[in-house]
Image: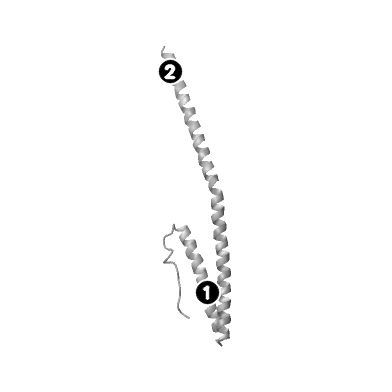
Amino acid sequence: MEERKKQNRRLSSLIFRVSIREKGRKMRAKTLFSLLSLIPYIVRIALSLFFLWLTLGWKARKGRKAFERQLTAEGIPKEHVKRLGRQYIKLKNDLVNAVKQSMFSGGRGFFFSFNVEENL
């Protein structure tokens, strides 16, 4: 009789371990599926940020050139025009760095990360 009880305990213990393993496998499968379902959204955000970066660079270059043309038309020497035009690129780089910093710091410090120098 006691032998039978021991076998029943072993059997129930074995069944419990198997059910725990199955639950673990199912949880891992669900977690993996959840992570894989995030991939399209991450790709979409990455592409949006890439096109935003491209557009910002193009608009900053276009604005800098128009600004330099206007100053040259007003008669300001070219070296001063180039020095003033470099501020457009510097501001664009500061903006891009602020966005990068906010992405990796969880949004803290976005508005305090601009470094605009007024030594024109």
Residue sitting farthest toward the top: 1
Vertical order, 25 against 59 (above or below): above
Q: Secondary structure at mark 2?
A: helix
Please identify the quadrant where the N terminus is shown. top left
Q: Residue at x 45, y 24 (%)?
A: 13
Q: Amino acid at mark 1?
A: Tyr
* Amino acid on which the number 2 mark rests in the picture: Lys
The type of colouring in the image is one colour
- Give the mark nearer the N terminus: 2 vs 1: 2
Q: Position of residue 46 (x, y in %)?
A: 55, 56
Q: Nearer the viewer, mark 2 or mark 1?
A: 1
* Residue 118 place in picture, x, y as percent: 45, 78
Q: Is residue 26 above or below residue 105?
A: above
| Occupied quadrant, residue 81 | bottom right
Tell me the distance, in whole angstroms, between the alpha carbons under discs 2 and 1.
81 Å
**Which residue corresponds to mark 1?**
88
Q: Residue at x 45, y 26 (%)?
A: 16
Residue underneath mark 2: 6
How far across and how far down the image is residue 62, in percent? 58, 73
| Mark 2 Cα-neighbour bin, 10 Å: few <14, some 14–19, many ≥20 | few
